[in-house]
Amino acid sequence: MRHSGGVRARIEGQGSGGSETTVNAAAAISARGISKSFGDVRALRGVDLDVRQGTVLGLLGPNGAGKTTLVRILATLLAPDAGSASVAGLDVVADQNRLRERIGLAGQYAAVDENLTGLENLTMVGRLYGFRRAVAKRRGRELLEQFDLVEAASRPVKTYSGGMRRRLDLAAALVAKPPVLFLDEPTTGLDPRSRLDLWDVIEKLVSQGTTVLLTTQYLDEADRLADRIAVIDHGSVIAEGTPDELKDRVGGERLEVHLEDASQATAAAQALATMSDEQPLLSEALIRIGVKGRSGAIIEAVRRLDGAGVGVDDIALRRPTLDDVFLALTGHAAEDGDQA
Ligand SMILES: Nc1ncnc2c1ncn2[C@@H]1O[C@H](COP(=O)(O)OP(=O)(O)O)[C@@H](O)[C@H]1O
Ligand SMILES: [Mg+2]
């Protein structure tokens, strides 16, 4: 699969010790040919990435795709085997100490201290950045306000809900007002309400100029938050573009038909085949097929199925999901991804 659009220099022949092409200095985050293996596992295979300042890049991929590995490299927590990257104008390897003050990292597993209160946690982080106690506390209060945690400020974190912990973790990442923020699956495991709240917070940060690299397994999250999306699978970026561009590649709306009788699946697939350029996807009594135009698709499908004598339980159109993106781009469903 080709990369789509953009000013991306493809780096060929990344060897160990080979000279690397310079990163894009105008971007807030720029990576070229980043590779990383853990023993036999090639977690990243030459990743190129650019994130313009003040924008959100959604790094979309299934479990094991390499998202966290890439984030850890860009956040200076892990050294790449090959390739180079700069964040906020600093090299992730050569300038790692200076860079740490300019980035924030928040993730799936909140890294706050359970036994401290919200305010104590944030004050402690401020102290770690070298703020005087009063300054650290003031910044902590400011963030608690911003993240709607004022009422919980003096309660131990172990009494917080999952959503509150995640907000506090994000607040902790923002203590030093970093211009670049890494969010590694920030909403995985959250209930829908907390998810929406966190999305609002992230949008606000971006509107204030923060550059965000956000990893996610959810297309809807990337869709809502990301200016551009990079799809990563098996350690390689396999597609990159705006949400609209990616959706176009997936093929627009999906028609889902639940049959009364799974034994009629083949007959149903045949009846629907010419409605799409793609092969229908069969899964017992469920048929999924990409359709081009939304209008009239359901009526057309019902007419065809009726003509073929196929009984239908339910029929609906829905937008592409992550699975559809993966199926279209890789030929396998996201949850099939083996870890190699
Ligand atoms: N410290 C590690 N040791 C060994 N294998 C690892 C380590 N970290 C990640 N991996 C492997 O690298 C691959 C990519 O993992 P990861 O970056 O965590 O993916 P993601 O965040 O997209 O789920 C997986 O196959 C994972 O098992
Ligand atoms: Mg991960």
Image (cartoon, rainbow, N blue to C red):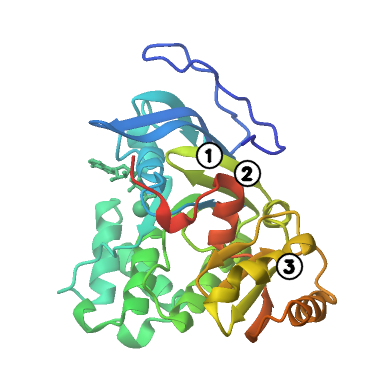
27 or 305: which is nearer to us? 305
Task: Name the secondary structure under disc 2.
Answer: strand
Q: Residues within 10 Å of mark 2 (few under 14, many from 20)?
A: many
Give the quarter of the figure containing the N terminus.
Answer: top right
Q: How many numbered marks are there?
A: 3
Where disc 1 sits, the SS reads strand
**Amino acid type assigned to the residue bearing label 1 in the image:** Val
The residue that label 1 is drawn on is 237
> Is label 2 in contact with label 1 (beta carbons under 8 Å)?
yes
- Which amino acid type is shown beneath numbered disc 3? Leu
Q: Is residue 39 visible?
A: yes
Circle 3 residues within 10 Å: few <14, some 14–19, many ≥20: many
Q: How dense is the environment of label 1, judged by Cα within 10 Å: few (below 14), some, or many (20 and up)?
A: many
Say which label, 2 or 3, has the lower sequence index. Answer: 2
Q: Can residue 57 be seen by looking at this rendering? A: no
Residue 334: image location, x then y, percent:
47, 55
Tell me which residue sits at (61%, 45%) in the image: 53
Mark identifier at residue 240: 2
Marks 3/1: CA distance? 33 Å
Q: Identify the residue position indicated by label 3 in the image.
A: 272
Q: Position of residue 57 (x, y in %)?
A: 57, 50
At a point 60% along the width and 37% down the height, the residue shown is: 27
Distance between the alpha carbons at the discs numbered 2 and 3: 31 Å
Determine whether, in the image, residue 116 is placed left or right of residue 215.
Answer: left
- What kind of residue is marked 2? Glu
Please state which of residues 110 and 216 is positioned toward the viewer in this rendering.
216
Q: Which mark is residue 48?
A: none
Determine if the C-beta at disc 1 is less than 8 A from ligand 1. no
Q: Quadrant of residue 340?
A: top left
Where in the figure is residue 38, as x and y percent of width and height? 26, 34
Which of pointers 3 and 1 indicates the residue nearer the eye? Answer: 3
